[in-house]
Amino acid sequence: MKIVRRIGVPPSARGSSAAGTCPDLFELSDGNFAVIGTEATADLKGELPPDAGVADYERIVIVNRETLVRAKGDIPDS
């Protein structure tokens, strides 16, 4: 599996000036997506609706609104 492309604009175009503040989205060679965000599993797991869950190998990650909104045009419809 490899990163094929960034989805949206680079963090620097969203005002990030440090490596520690770089939420980002990437399309992978297998068609899935990878997300860099703030890990928030402990804070949000108890807030999930009853039909949602987090496996031991999964994490809830927060991506700020600007990152996702600016990526919207690059996300394929199918």
Image (spheres, grey):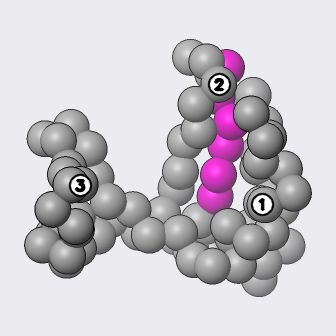
Q: Which numbered disc, 1 or 3, marks the residue that appears first in the sequence? A: 3
Q: Is residue 23 above or below residue 29?
A: below
Residue at mark 2: 31
Q: Secondary structure at mark 3?
A: loop
Which quarter of the image is occupied by the N terminus?
top right
Q: Is residue 42 visible in this depiction of the protein?
A: yes
The spot of residue 70 in percent (x, y) is: 80, 69
The spot of residue 16 in percent (x, y) is: 70, 78
Neighbour tally class for label 2: few under 14, some 14-19, many 20 plus, Cα within 10 Å: few
Q: Is residue 41 above or below residue 30?
A: below
The spot of residue 48 in percent (x, y) is: 22, 68
Q: Which residues are magenta?
A: 24-29
Q: Is residue 10 visible in this depiction of the protein?
A: no
Neighbour tally class for label 3: few under 14, some 14-19, many 20 plus, Cα within 10 Å: few
Kindly report the distance in space between the C-alpha atoms of the residues bearing marks 3 and 2.
23 Å
Q: Secondary structure at mark 2?
A: loop
The amino acid at mark 1 is: Ala
Residue at mark 3: 52
Residue at mark 1: 71
Q: Is residue 42 left or right of residue 65?
A: left
